[in-house]
């Protein structure tokens, strides 16, 4: 059985300690991004397939989500780099309930020493603006899983383009994998299919900082 199916089984059986141990030992050395992208994410996608084909119930899927969240929170607690001063604010658009991907993104930024404000899913735009204006993030990350969120997402991007300090906007979530969102992109708006894209962007950003400071 593949790693992610084993992990999905542990989620569905409510085996949180076993799931955590499996995650921590499936690769050496441990890499947070790889653990999220190559194990937790495919495990939850597998749970989605089982749910779609009625092999598991909604209650099973909720249990799997809760265990995945637990494991993710434990990994997130591991040591991060020193603070490097940059700020990111993350949220899921209004009515969007899926949040595990965004929580992984928060954890990756934290690991790189960013100051993170993770606001969770289902945040109306007017409320997001209150936090954005007080926190003044360098980067705003937005997540949406379902295709019918695209109009909302478009509105969110447009409204952040007016911010005077010109933050970078990152768009991710399941619909970024399913649709060609190049029409959303610009020199300040980046669409990301997964955490590999995020990691590549973060490394480029770091290179730019080093280039300016030397
Ligand atoms: C768990 C789950 C739920 C839970 C959510 C729990 C929670 N709080 O997160 C609940 C029960 C609430 C739920 C509800 C629904 N769900 Co649901 N859900 C799932 C499931 C099984 C897993 C989601 C998940 O956590 N995936 C794992 C994460 C890590 O993956 P990810 O979000 O894609 O994130 C990755 C990238 O996209 C990226 N990323 C994500 N966000 C961002 C942001 C930035 C800035 C960046 C850089 C990257 C990034 O990072 C991650 C790692 O690569 C999926 C199956 C699937 N394929 O995802 C279905 C799934 C997404 N749901 C689905 C559906 C239909 C629904 C409902 C409409 C069902 C209903 N009839 O009520 C509702 C809609 C709720 C809503 N209003 O949003 C369908 C969507 C199908 C479609 N055609 O679009 C899926 C695919 C299941 C299926 N196979 O049918 N769901």
Image (cartoon, helix red, strand yellow):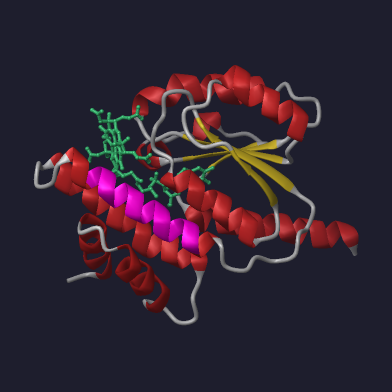
Q: Is residue 119 left or right of residue 114?
A: left
Q: Position of residue 65 (x, y in %)?
A: 32, 48
Residue sitting at the far right: 214
Ligand 1 occupies quarter? top left
Q: Position of residue 77 (x, y in %)?
A: 56, 62
Q: Position of residue 10 (x, y in %)?
A: 24, 63
Task: Find the magenta span and give its range.
Answer: 61-74
Viewport quadrant of the N terminus = bottom left
Is residue 40 shown above or below 92? below
Residue lying at 50% horizontally and 71% vertically, measured from the top left: 31
Viewport quadrant of the C terminus = bottom right
Front residue of 79/16: it is 16
Q: Position of residue 121 (x, y in %)?
A: 47, 33
Displayed quadrant of residue 129: top right
Front residue of 12/1: it is 12
Residue lying at 87% horizontally and 57% vertically, measured from the top left: 212
Q: Is residue 37 left or right of residue 54?
A: right
For the stretch drawn in magenta, the main secondary structure is helix
Residue sitting at the far bottom: 28
Displayed quadrant of residue 39: bottom left
Front residue of 47/11: it is 11
Residue 69 magenta-drawn? yes
């Amino acid at each position: 059985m593949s790693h992610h199916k084993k992990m999905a089984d542990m989620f569905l059986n409510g085996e949180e300690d076993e799931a955590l141990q499996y995650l921590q030992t499936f690769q050496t050395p441990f890499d947070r991004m790889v653990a999220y992208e190559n194990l937790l994410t495919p495990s939850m996608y597998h749970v989605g397939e089982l749910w779609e084909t009625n092999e598991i119930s909604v209650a099973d899927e909720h249990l799997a989500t809760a265990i995945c969240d637990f494991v993710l929170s434990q990994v997130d607690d591991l040591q991060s780099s020193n603070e490097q001063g940059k700020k990111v604010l993350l949220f899921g658009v209004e009515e969007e309930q899926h949040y595990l991907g965004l929580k992984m993104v928060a954890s990756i930024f934290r690991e790189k020493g960013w100051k993170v404000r993770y606001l969770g899913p289902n945040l109306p735009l007017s409320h997001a603006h209150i936090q954005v204006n007080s926190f003044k993030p360098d980067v705003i990350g937005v997540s949406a899983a379902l295709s019918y969120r695209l109009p909302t997402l478009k509105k969110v991007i447009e409204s952040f383009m007016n911010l005077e300090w010109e933050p970078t906007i990152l768009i991710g979530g399941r619909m970024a994998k399913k649709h060609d969102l190049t029409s959303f992109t610009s020199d300040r708006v980046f669409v990301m299919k997964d955490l590999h894209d995020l990691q590549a962007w973060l490394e480029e950003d770091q290179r730019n900082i080093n280039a300016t400071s030397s």
